[in-house]
Amino acid sequence: MQLVTELFKLITEERLSWIRKLALVSALALVTMVSTVQPRAQSSVPFILVKAGRLLDPRTGNVLAPVAVLIKGNRIKQVGSPSQIYTPVGTTTIDLGNATLLPGLIDSHTHLFLDVIVPPEAETLRHPNGKFAPGLLLAIVESPSKRALIGAQLAREDLESGITTVRNLGHSGIDGDTELRDAINAGRVPGPRILASGRKLITRGEYVQNLNPALSEEILCQEFLLIDGADRAREAVRQNAFQNVDVIKVSADENLTVPELTSVVEEAHREHLKVAVHASDITSIQTAIDAGADSIEHGNLATDEQLKKMREKGIFLVLTPTFDGGFFLKISEPSIVMSSAKHAAELDAAERGRTRYEALVHG
């Protein structure tokens, strides 16, 4: 009996020894596999070293020269003088010579889905907003799929031009900019980071007028949300919040009341959304100030007193100098025949716009 017990003990210890050996071998194999796979995974991420003559640091205002930027994958790992940066083996070097590097630019007011086409002179005279409204109406009745592809193209062009963030403030259909934003974030299409506003909030009768009354509501709702009183203003904000927008855009004219816009601002802030207000004339600018808007877009006619009040209330002024530099004339001249009187008027308007912009910025 004792012999059987000793034999069982010996067999058990031998078995446990083999189990321990097997576990040790398995552990060593796992460590070996991890140690060989991990460097491969790391080395599969490419390094790129970009050399240039100068780099502007907007935080300090300083210019670093010369400069090198080490990039790993799609992340900047290090910025400094070439002698300061350690370059891993296998790094690809891109020498830009005497070029100046800038950080990604931000376009704070854009319309990626709006391809502005100025109609002939005779057609512009038939509309209160003759330069803009006909092209906008055509955009509204376009296929949403076509507009989405146009938006994707313009987003890619922005990114390739060095613009890495944009605020898209309306004219995107019901959900064009929010869907493009999500597609870019998911890596399905190239483009900048987008702050999307969804449909623009407007008062009835703005932008396009005299539409077929049987179809007007349906046409307008493809592009806008109407503000008809404080309650509907709040409802419009909620509809855009349902589309997961990043900002609320309102177009203010002399018909928009302070209580209506205040309702928009209060509801948007309750949804943790900022409110950008298109306001170009003095009355609309004052309405935006009184209602507590977060930013005033354009605002070129703002008075000194209004600018002081905006500063006190923390309201940003987003200038759009393009429209004051003969923008419509530049896109019209190559393809549209206009009368000498019209051409002269456009040149005069452009010069007045430039003068007003210079006075606002530098005055």
Image (cartoon, rainbow, N blue to C red):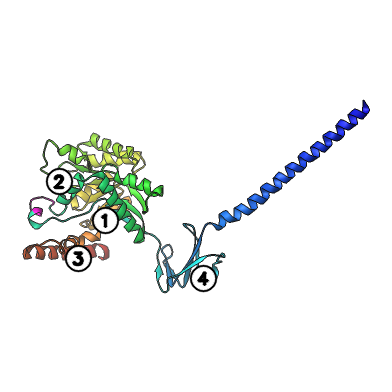
Tags 1 and 4 touching, CB below 8 Å: no
Tell me which label, 4 or 2, sits earlier in the chain.
4
Q: Tell me the kind of residue under disc 4.
A: Pro
Specify the quadrant of the image occupied by residue 250.
Answer: top left
Q: Position of residue 327 (x, y in %)?
A: 20, 61
Q: Is residue 141 left or right of residue 50?
A: left
Q: Tell me the kind of residue under disc 3.
A: Thr
Residue at mark 3: 355
Q: Helix, strand, or loop for circle 4? A: helix
- Other-residue count near label 3 (Cα within 10 Å), few / some / many at <14 / 14–19 / ≥20: few
**Residue at image location 29% in from the left, 48% down from the top:** 148
Q: Position of residue 351 (x, y in %)?
A: 16, 66
Instruction: Tell me the CA gap for discs 3 and 2.
Output: 29 Å
Mark nearer the viewer, 3 or 2: 2
Instruction: Tell me the CA gap for discs 3 and 1.
Output: 18 Å
Residue at mark 2: 208
Q: Is residue 320 left or right of residue 66?
A: left
Say which of 2 and 322 sits in front: 2
Residue at mark 4: 82
Above or below, 53 relative to 195? below
Tell me which label, 3 or 1, sits earlier in the chain.
1
Instruction: Tell me the CA gap for discs 3 and 4.
Output: 44 Å
Q: Which residues lie in the magenta part?
A: 123-129
Tags 3 and 1 touching, CB below 8 Å: no
Q: Tell me the kind of residue under disc 2.
A: Val
Residue extending furthest toward the bottom: 98
Query: Which of the numbered marks, if any, corresponds to residue 307?
Result: 1
Tell me which label, 1 or 2, sits earlier in the chain.
2
Tags 4 and 2 touching, CB below 8 Å: no
Tell me which label, 3 or 4, sits earlier in the chain.
4
Q: Tell me the kind of residue under disc 1.
A: Leu
